[in-house]
Image (cartoon, rainbow, N blue to C red):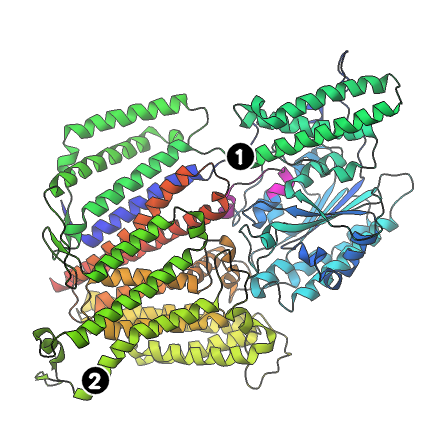
Amino acid sequence: MKVRSSVFASFILIFEVIGIALFLRGFFPVPVKSSLSSKNKLSDLPAEPLSGSSPNSSRLPQPLFKRVVIMLVDALREDFVFGPNGRMYMPYTRHVVERSSSHSFVAKAKPPTVTMPRIKALTTGSIPGFIDVVMNLNSPALVEDNLIWQAKEAGKRIIFYGDDTWVRLFPKHFMEYDGTTSFFVSDYTEVDNNVTRHLDSTLKRDDWDILILHYLGLDHIGHISGPHSSLIQPKLLEMDDILKKIHGALISKEAEGSLPYLLVLCGDHGMSETGSHGGSSEPEINTPLVLISPAFKRKVGMEKPGVVEQVDLTPTLALGLGLPISQNSVGRVIPGVLEETSLRDQLRFLHLNGHQLSCLLKDSTANYEKEAGFEQFRVAEKAHGSWMKLYLEGNTSEVLTNMGKKVLKQYLDALASMSSALGKQLGKYDMYSMIAGMVFVFQLLLVLLLAMPEALSGAAAVDIPVLSSLLSLPFYLLCLLLSSVHVLVCTSAESSCYFCSLSWGLVFVAVAFSSAMFCILISMVTRRLPQGTKIHGKSPLRSSGSEWSLSELDVLLLAGTVGHTLSLAASSFVEEEHQTWYFLLSTLCLAIFQDVCRKYFREQSGSRDEEEELILPSKDGHPSTPPKAEMYSEKWLALATPPFTLLCCRLLRSLNQTGVQWAHLPDVGHWLNSSEHKVVISLLAAFCLVLIYLLVQRRCSWVSKVALALGLLGVYSYRAAVGNVLFPWQHSGRTPSKGTVEARFVYVFVLGILFTGTKDLLRSQIITADAKLKSRGLWEIYSGLVLLVTLLFRPHNMPVLCCCLLIQTLMAQFIWKKLHYDAAQTTIMHYWFGQAFFYFQGNSNNIGTVDISVGFIGLESYVEAPAIFLTALNTYAGPVLWACHLVCYLSSARGRSPVSVGHGCYCLALLRSVPAAAYIVLVTVLRYHLFIWSVFSPKLLYESMHLLLTAGICLFFNTMEQSHSSGTS
């Protein structure tokens, strides 16, 4: 069965997306949880150890606190409280930490450092999986055992104000609540005022036991302008005043002889140097934890805060309120909170925590008895029983006290070991789904590779032996074999597999597909065996039938692509992947420069190829030769293009520090964003907008040119409204606004340009086969996309867009066309440039570099669909713009045919499939290593998103090719 290259590539990509989805379903594991579906209850608590007689009562010690107020400040970094600027940012909090009855800690959050997973960690004590990053957009109700459910079951009255993620997680748990949208990051004032307005009346009331406040303003400021913004200090002072108000109210209502209160100040995660979060850098995972209560000793000076895990707060609050610990909690009680209680109560609290951790360890580890922490707990429990026997006998000697302290230390060591062991088990992988997805993806990749000679041939068509494979005996034998394996795995698997839960109809389709792909592979390999590969020094790449010739540039492109894929096997190369692309791009520029020099200096000036190139049709249809001056300028512009591209890339590398190791270093972007250089960034933004207009408007109709000019003026107006840049008549002290009107003004022109381009494109495909009209439609759609990206880019990133457009213009005019690079070579170059510009924007393989604030430009409230679209477009603007430019160039360049479009589609599919397949193998091999969660998991999500984008582009390629063929016929 013969199909066009673009159709074939689209088919492969769509099924690869399905295979990767199946792999991801198994790779993102279910977090460590108890096998019991029920929740812990007071009646299920173990008895107090007592050796030599029947067990003692299962009583809980008296609760430590009557009331608890949790003040959670989103994105509160530990240095905002404990750092050198702590006294300036939060003076009252620092006074309490240094001189009052309090305990202060640095609480370490596990990645992913995103709000919803961190709330789950704080309430369940478990470590959420990385899939919770996706679930963060639409949090379902939390059904596993958690602190809020335990408090409600115990009759505690809970009030909540703040981030509505809590309301979605605990829909029927709060006596009173008022949720605010957490994703509308443009608002950092009202979102906190909506919480604070309830405080005065609530603090005067006595009808509540737990008050939870979740403030979002600081996090929103970080997303908008970073941790060093001038808005940070006023917001932290506001939070400090709120803490002071709460503390004062709790002190005034403290009754003689009643249980004390507990005030908790904490953050769910920190904030990176760029203001984002989600990764595993120190500023993102280190958060302050301040516990304030008259039950603690009064401090006499500043002490270095201790280090605890964020999940340790869960068992501490549970025991402090007289509640059972959540059964999936991996945290351990904070010893300092218990220091003023009796030794018996301290041992009982630690015993309850140890029993809960040991039960969880039994459920999650096959050889739990070999775990050091489990054995330590059993030894401590026996020693505790001996101590209890002496205690109940009335022994009051110093020996009993020393023995109790020894048991206390044994418990603490056991808790630390068990908590650490459980924390390393991020989850249970669904290996069957992972292997099934990996087999699908690799079968498709091999078919894609074996089809390369035909796909890149002059016919741009692939002959797939589908019918012969489906009618062969091996196909039916493989179906029987794979079905037997499926039954065997699903009946013997200890844990549930997603693939086993599918209906037999879907399973049979998957088995038949895999068997058919295997038979097709065998047929294609048999057909390719006699053919070989030849390497020559001529350029460009040519293929006719089975014979291939590779130029020096082809070897570089092939070696660079394969080398990049192999480099991803090391975590350091993943963290610093931008360095790989910067190196490859620099090498590519040098190789292109060599080709340009060879063309203009080494080839004979009277060669036939050059004569054909120089003879151009005149307006009256007769051939004419361009003037010598024009030839001379064209020659030197072509020679200057590769060095100029190198210079642009070097400047862009200094604009945004990215990666992990050097992301904290200052860069040009930081310098431009400082308040002292607002005039400089204003002039730079104005210059960039003018240059963008000059580069983009050349191929547009006059209507689109006017709309583009007005849209770019609206972009500058929007940035001036939000305070990023200045108008000449505008005072720098002006209060910034949200810029909603200005942004919507730009959206109108974006939609207008896209409508005009789409109208021209449809006319060229349906009404009249006009290649010029089709070309103009494509370029107008591209210009509308450029205008939208300009609006989303921050002012300091506008030079990235300018350089992108300038390099595209120069390369298309003087390199790709003049040097006659074919579609495959041009596609690979576009792919390399797109990947490099992804990092020039300041992106990395860390999810914390995703700028979600752009998703709310022009919106007055959170609307999920446009917010996700705008955020994704801003993140992938570099690859998307280069891919769209490739579509326009291959579809509209003079002399291009549908064959070129098919070649481009096939090459894009191949370039995206190879790293995706390699990554699947890599994370499968390294699945038990903890560091893959902070390094490889975001990269795998990025690769999956790239694959989806490529699939969409190839579908567009296929549509254009089909329409062109129909119009021609």
In which image quadrant can residue 756 be found?
bottom left
Task: Report whether residue 48 is seen.
Answer: no
Q: Which is more toward the observer, 857 or 944?
A: 944
Residue 542: image location, x then y, percent: 13, 59
Mark 1 lies on residue: 425
Q: Residue at x 84, y 23 (%)?
A: 400
Q: Residue at x 52, y 74 (%)?
A: 719
Residue 390: image location, x then y, percent: 83, 18
| 784 on left or right of 381 | left
- Please say whether residue 126 is one of the residues in the magenta stretch: yes
Label 1 secondary element = loop
Q: Residue at x 40, y 61 (%)?
A: 838
Mark 2 lies on residue: 632
Alpha carbon separation for disc pair 1 and 2:
67 Å
**229 shown above or below 315:** below
Q: Could you classify mark 2 by the number of other residues whose Cα lies within 10 Å: few (under 14), some (14-19), or many (20 or more)?
A: few
Please identify the residue farthest to the right as the structure is shown.
256
In which image quadrant can residue 888 be found?
bottom left
Q: Which residues are magenta?
A: 120-135
